[in-house]
Amino acid sequence: MKIGALEAGGTKMVCAIGDENGKIEKRVSYPTQTPQETIPQIMEFFGNEGIQALGIGCFGPVELNRKSPVYGYITSTPKLAWANYPMAGTFAKALGIPVGFDTDVNGAALGEVVYGAAKGCDTAIYITVGTGVGVGVYANGALLHGLVHPEAGHMLITRRHGDTYRGKCPYHENCLEGLAAGPAIMERWGKPAAELADRKEVWELESDYLAQAVANYILTLSPQKVVLGGGVMHQEQMFPLVRKKVQEKLNSYLQNDTIQNHMEEYIIPPALGDNAGITGALLLGLQEFGKLAVR
C-alpha cells in the first residue's frame, strides 16, 4: 500500500511516499511560505501519487482533541499566516482519504519507538533542539495529548548565575527554547552552533540548560529512553556533557541502574537520524488507516 507523509515544519514542508513497512520510497520538500503558496504544491504532489492515507506531523501548537470543532487546526502559532489553519481537514477533504494528525515531535517520538532508538519501549521521549525545542512524549503505549499536547520545550528553567542573555522566547524569559535553541545560540554568541564547536564555554552553558530540562522530564515522565535530536545535537560533544550533568542534577535520588551506570544507553541520539519526523508522519498515516497497532 502507499501512504503519504508530511512533516510540516516552520522552515520547510517535507513530503514523502512510503509503504506499510515504514520504507520511504520518494521524498520532496517545499519552503514553508503562506498556506496559499505552499499547500497547492503539497496537494499536487500527493494528488498524483494514489495514496491510501496521509499522516501529518505538524509544527504547532495544534488542536488534537477529536471532539473539538477545530480538531486538526494549527492554532496560536507565531507563524501568523498559519494561525487557525485547518491543516488536517484541508487534506482530508481534498484527497478523500484518512488523515492522521499530531505534532511533529510526537511523530518523531513514534518513529523512534517503532523503528528507532526507543524500539520496544512503552514510555519514551524525543527531544529536538534546533530552530526551536520540542518534546514528543510516548507514554504507556500511546502518544501523549491531554488538555492540549506537550509543550515541554517551554519548560521554565533556572538561569545560570552570571548569564545576562535576555532569552529569545517572546513568551518566557527563562524557558528552555528561549535560552538554548539555535536562534538563542546565534543571538547570544554571534555565530550559529555549527561555527562554535571549539568554544567550550558555549557547550558548558548549553548542556547545563538542557540537562536541567532532561532531569525534570525524567522525574516527571519516567521515560525508558531519552532521545535527543535536532541540529544543535549534531554537536556530539553535547551527549557526554548532558549525561554527566543529568546525573549530577538527579543526585542519586533515583536508585536505578540505568541512570546511575548506563547513561550512554539511556540518553541517546535518534537511530533514524533526521528521518525520525518523516517516518513518524508515515506511521501516523498507517495508524489512521488502521494498519498500526500502537496508538
Image (cartoon, rainbow, N blue to C red):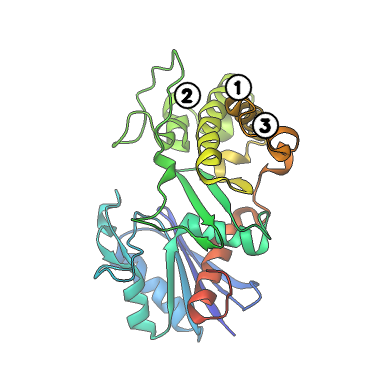
Return the residue nearer the eye: 70 or 54.
70
Disc 1 crowd rating (10 Å Cα; few below 14, some 14-19, many 20+) is few
Residue 219 spot, x, y in % from top left: 53, 38
Q: Secondary structure at mark 2?
A: helix
Splitting the image into 4 quarters, where does residue 211 fall? Answer: top right
Label pair 1/2, CB-CB below 8 angstroms: yes
Kindly report the distance in space between the C-alpha atoms of the residues bearing marks 1 and 2: 10 Å
Q: Which residue is mark 2?
A: 189
Kindly report the distance in space between the C-alpha atoms of the residues bearing marks 3 and 1: 11 Å
Q: Nearer the viewer, mark 3 or mark 2?
A: 3
Kindly report the distance in space between the C-alpha atoms of the residues bearing marks 3 and 2: 18 Å
Q: Which residue is mark 3?
A: 237
Asked if residue 217 is positioned above or below residue 160 in the image, the reply reads below
Splitting the image into 4 quarters, where does residue 202 fall? Answer: top right
The three-letter code of the residue at mark 1 reads: Arg
Disc 3 crowd rating (10 Å Cα; few below 14, some 14-19, many 20+) is some
Residue 294 visible, this angle: yes
Q: Residue at x 54, y 76 (%)?
A: 286
Q: Which residue is mark 1?
A: 199
Q: Residue at x 41, y 28 (%)?
A: 187
